[in-house]
Image (tube, coloured by chain):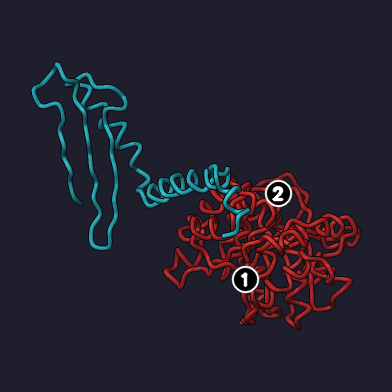
Chain colours: A cyan, B red
Amino acid sequence: MSLLDYFKTSKASSASLAKERLQILVAHERSSRNEPSYLPQLQKELLEVIRKYVNVEQDAISVTFEQSDTQETLELNIVLPENQTNTSQHNNPSER
Amino acid sequence: MARIIVVTSGKGGVGKTTTSAAIAMGLAKKGHKTAVIDFDVGLRNLDLIMGCERRVVYDFVNVINGEASLNQALIRDKNCNLLYILPASQTRDKDALSQEGVGKILDELKKDFKYIVCDSPAGIEKGAHLAMYFADDAFIVTNPEVSSVRDSDRMLGILSSKSRRAEQNEEPIKEFLLLSRYSPDRVKLGEMLSVDDVQEILSLHLLGVIPESKSVLTASNSGIPVILDEKSDAGQAYADIVARYLGEDRPHRFIDEKKGLFGKLFGSK
């Protein structure tokens, strides 16, 4: 590295910012690429069912799909409101 | 055995048509009978870049509809007699192309041509889908810029799931990165994503870097594929790309900035 480079790299460049943003974005979009297409609908219907019993927010439920060589995992995570029950979080991973 | 190459990017304006024209000409100049097809129905432009816009009589859609034969629609290039152009139609009917129709034309072309270059439209609509559906190889044209890199990654996902090879569980499409409009000076200043950055994000095999060059506009102004401008940096970059695709081992150029005396004295390399 020359003396000149030292001065140039002293503050974070916009290119490195671009790279960082892209890496996060691309990783996220790739992970959702292999998801089954029924996932959003499943999430919506589950939310409706849960709301019959507990008043939860729209974003209180998350459905994630993970795929490895040997198995596919569907993870369902529902955050219940604190005042309604003594278990604040209910975790229910189910495998297909 | 004929090979079908799709030139795609997702994003518009990154240089798909410039690239299609250049590599089709490059392959033909190397002695391979080549056809280049414009899939941008409604917005055809390959004819302009190839300089044959006044010789278009029949187009891709005419052939699909049986209104003209393939031989009637194919235009022989004025600079190279091994190169043929199949122009897109200017119809506004979005459903003018059908998978069956495109498949039939490609099968017919495969009997006679060594390489078939499919110039994809921007976006992920039907034209873009059909341009890549039958491909054996994909040239992903990307600019060192966030939206282009993101769209390229999106196209990679589509290539690996919605193509004929993917659907029939055949060997996947071979994907190559062509990084265009590259400015080594700006990369050095930290203003532009570098080749390494883009490769790291997309993890693609780099076929070549095409520098930002005035010669690209000059070439399109005159309707001559830039690869024929052998003195230009972009022309040489495309010549390298064609040679590498055909299996020649050529070192990458145009990645480092041109150095003046100052740079030579104080530069790191």
Dot 1: element: strand
Circle 2: is it few (<14), some (14-19), or many (20+) Cα within 10 Å?
A: some
Q: CA distance from mark 1 to mark 2?
A: 23 Å
Q: B256 or B39: nearer the eye?
A: B256
- Taking the view exactly as shown, the residue that stands out farthest to the left is A86
Q: Amino acid at mark 2?
A: Gly
- Of discs 1 and 2, which sits in the foreground? 2
Count how many numbered circles sit on residues in the image: 2
Q: Amino acid at mark 1?
A: Ile
Please determine whether, in this image, residue A93 is positioned above or below residue B98: above
- Residue A77 percent location from the top left of the image: 22, 36
- The numbered dot on residue A41 is none
Question: Are tags 1 and 2 found on a single chain?
Answer: yes
The image quadrant where one finds the N terminus of chain B is bottom right
Q: Earlier in the sequence, mark 1 or mark 2?
A: 1
- For residue A66, side relative to residue B97 (left or right): left
Where's residue A15, x and y in %? 57, 47
Q: Which residue is mark 1?
A: B4
Query: In the rendered structure, the residue with mark 2 lies on which chain?
Result: B
**Please, which chain is the residue tagged with disc 1 on?**
B
| Quarter occupied by the C terminus of chain B | bottom right
Q: Which mark is residue B13?
A: 2
Q: Quadrant of residue B117?
A: bottom right
- Give the structural element (helix, strand or loop) at label 2: loop
Image spot of residue A51 (x, y percent): 23, 22
Q: Residue at x 69, y 74 (%)?
A: B242
Quarter where residue B23 is shown: bottom right
Nearer to me, B131 or B144: B144
Depth check: B145 or A85 in front? Answer: B145
Q: Residue at x 63, y 59 (%)?
A: B179
Q: Position of residue B99 (x, y in %)?
A: 59, 59
Query: For this view, does A42 lie left or right of residue B37?
Result: left
